Image: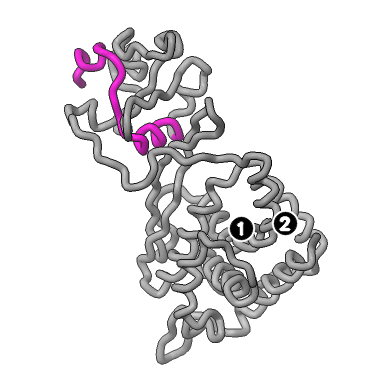
Amino acid sequence: MKNEYCKIGQPIMSADKVGEIYYKRADILDKGIFMINKISNNKFMFSHKDDFNNGKVNATARPCIFLGEDGECMLGDEKPDTCNGEKVIKPLILKDMFKIGFKKNELKKRLIRIKEDMVLFLTIWHLNRLLDKIEGDVLGDVFKIEYTYKLVLVDNDTMNSIRYTKLIAVDKKYEVVAKIYNTISRNMIVLPPDYATLIVSKLNNFIRAGNFKTCESELDDVRNSSVYLLSMFRLYINNYKQKSNEFKGIVESARTYNFLKDINNELGGNDSGSLFKREKIECIIDNNEQMYKIIMKSK
């Protein structure tokens, strides 16, 4: 531990590292006394609010805010590379901060496409439900999981952080599932919380109004959820007429697959039989088709 370095002031770090620390260590930072400061392109630091005056921050006013009373770093292995003597912060390909939230006119425009958002939300919902329950970086024997942390600007004065979840198909037959999930998830995660809450509220009402089957299936959870994703996305690419521009790439790519015309072929089979028996997934497909119709008929 380089205590002398820690006593000099606040370390500089990349936007992604700031996002990761803020996401993981809100227990330290959510006390109303710390700030996130942008120094230059992709260079950020945390500071105590008392060290900010007249638009400037004094980076050496106190020891590093993460230096514990015992002289050890409270971040442990999560500390930024600059704390280990690294002097170069890797540039970001993407923007260092994303904006969350709608202006009044933007919300009105977005509400026009709320049916599309509900369909896409449902497409990845079953896999999200599984991801919320696991600890670690694998989902069954089907996917590896990578996490990326990003800074977001909630309004002109407030920063926060979000975590992107990326699925990597260990079983190559599921690469198309990972591609669909990753693309939709990246777009959904930056929706404002109040808009996302509206989507969930509407979907819950539709579920209560429907007559859905309890699907008995021999599939394990990951494969079961993959069938839900594929069948709902098939409805989207085949039936939804006014798809948004940000999904154009994945839609065109996905058209090269024969979605669920025969899901046995889509996810692969073998000489002794397929991974999925058609009768085992018809229940899932029927439920998705019913939900899609309810959404499209809603006002």
Q: Residues within 10 Å of mark 1 (few under 14, many from 20)?
A: many
Q: CA distance from mark 2 to mark 1?
A: 9 Å
Q: Earlier in the sequence, mark 2 or mark 1?
A: 1
Residue 200 image point, x, y percent: 69, 51
Q: Which mark is residue 121?
A: 1
Position of the C terminus by quadrant: bottom right
The residue closer to the viewer here, 255 or 123, is 255
Q: Which mark is residue 16?
A: none
Residue 111 is one of the magenta-drawn residues: no
Instruction: Residue at 32% x, 33% y: name it.
Output: 41
Q: Quadrant of residue 85?
A: top left
Query: Of all residues shown, which one is farthest toward the bottom?
Result: 271
In this rendering, the answer to whether 93 lies above or below 60 is below
Instruction: Residue at 45% x, 18% y: name it.
Output: 34
Q: Which residue is mark 2?
A: 203
Residue 203 image point, x, y percent: 72, 56
Per the rendered image, the range of residues in magenta is 1-23
Instruction: Residue at 56% x, 85% y: name it.
Output: 261
Q: Secondary structure at mark 1?
A: helix
Position of 174 with respect to 1 (left or right) is right
Query: The disc labelled 1 sits on which kind of residue?
Result: Phe
Instruction: Residue at 48% x, 65% y: name it.
Output: 180
